[in-house]
Image (cartoon, grey):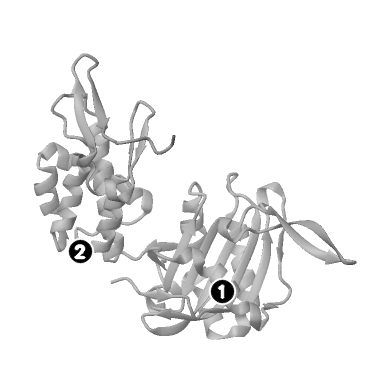
Amino acid sequence: MSAKIRFTSATATGLVLAKVGHPQRNEPLQTSKEVFKIEEKDQEPLAAIFLKPFKNLSAHRFSHHSSLDQHEMNSCAAAIFAADDGLLEKGCDIAKRLYAKSNHPNIKSGDLCISLVRDIDIDGELIRGLCILKSESVVPFLSISTRDGDLELHTEQGINPEKIDKGCLILDHLASKGYYVLTFDRTGSDSRFWVRDFLGVVPVTDSPFLTNKYANLAVAFIEKEKKGKPAAADDTPPWGNSNAAITYFEEKENFSLQEFEDEVLKTPDAKARFAEHRSKIEEEQGHKLDDSFEISKKDVSNVKKKIRSSMKLDTGVEIRLKPAVAAKPDAVLEHGFDEARKMKFIKIYFNEDLAD
């Protein structure tokens, strides 16, 4: 099962900062000469800002083909957790690693913040964490101050906490298995660089992860299959197609790949194409998916809300539904097929246009 993590009591105590340029563009790396000590009054507010992006993320762990002792990021984290005075040296080593891995032309230079955080609650135990944040853009901020009895407006360039591009939180938990690591990359395009090349982590394949992965994989496969077929009057509506997979996850306590294929995919051709689809995803992500696991009902609900809330049609039309409507779309939507145009259609029932 996934760990329960709370940040309400967390405090950030020290920082190592860096400006990470791009080696191929001859941009330098600049790192802190001393640990920046955070004043006591700022420790909790800063921790709240640093840790906010890590809520509700899937867990990862460090992985090495030979031994975790040879994993650079794992070793840096272990040294920092072992002694607080290692933050400066190992924090700078982390910045140097990021700089060395930033050779791809699409990778942007940016500001790096490495913070030691105390009193993170994980399953009721207070532990430490190492927070790594990278911001690849600065934005203008406005501030008003008093001078000589009057007010002045100032502009400054800085980091918007809501727009931090990449982040990693290494928790001092399950060290022998590669620690408990949370990570994100808002840019999306370079996530392989951040997750694999720099951090060297793989997903913790627990119940929530596998439920999310298989449910989304199944829905994506069914939608892809549907788009590959010519329109026909007796086609199942889009919501029905997606629900065929989701219903399986809702009704079962445990997932079995063979059972899923027999009950949902049914035909040998569909099973074979799904196997190809799954293998492609496994190859892209660098790990195989388990064939059986306990289903996380919470994550099934999240996937269900996501797929029911919108429709993207090939004619350029997108329909978005509020959760209450998405739960029972047949109450206001009617699907059909126009023989003259040889196209599907959706009829929407309503009482008045609230946008007027």
Going 61% across and 72% down the picture, which residue do you hit? 91
Q: Quadrant of the C terminus?
A: top left
Q: Is residue 289 visible?
A: no
Query: Could you classify mark 1 by the number of other residues whose Cα lies within 10 Å: few (under 14), some (14-19), or many (20 or more)?
Result: many
Q: Quadrant of the N terminus?
A: bottom left
Q: Is residue 207 above or below residue 354?
A: below
| Separation of marks 1 and 2 at Cα, in angstroms | 35 Å
The numbered dot on residue 344 is none
Q: Amino acid at mark 1?
A: Ala
**Residue closer to the observer: 173 or 320:** 320
Q: Position of residue 328 (x, y in %)?
A: 22, 46
**Residue closer to the observer: 80 or 129:** 129
The numbered dot on residue 47 is 1
Q: Position of residue 208 (x, y in %)?
A: 29, 63
Residue at the top extreme, as displayed = 340
* Labels in figure, total: 2
The numbered dot on residue 293 is 2
Q: Is residue 229 above or below residue 72?
A: above
Drawn side of residue 117 relative to residue 353, left or right: right
**Residue closer to the observer: 252 or 255:** 252
Q: Amino acid at mark 2?
A: Phe
Q: Position of residue 300 (x, y in %)?
A: 25, 57
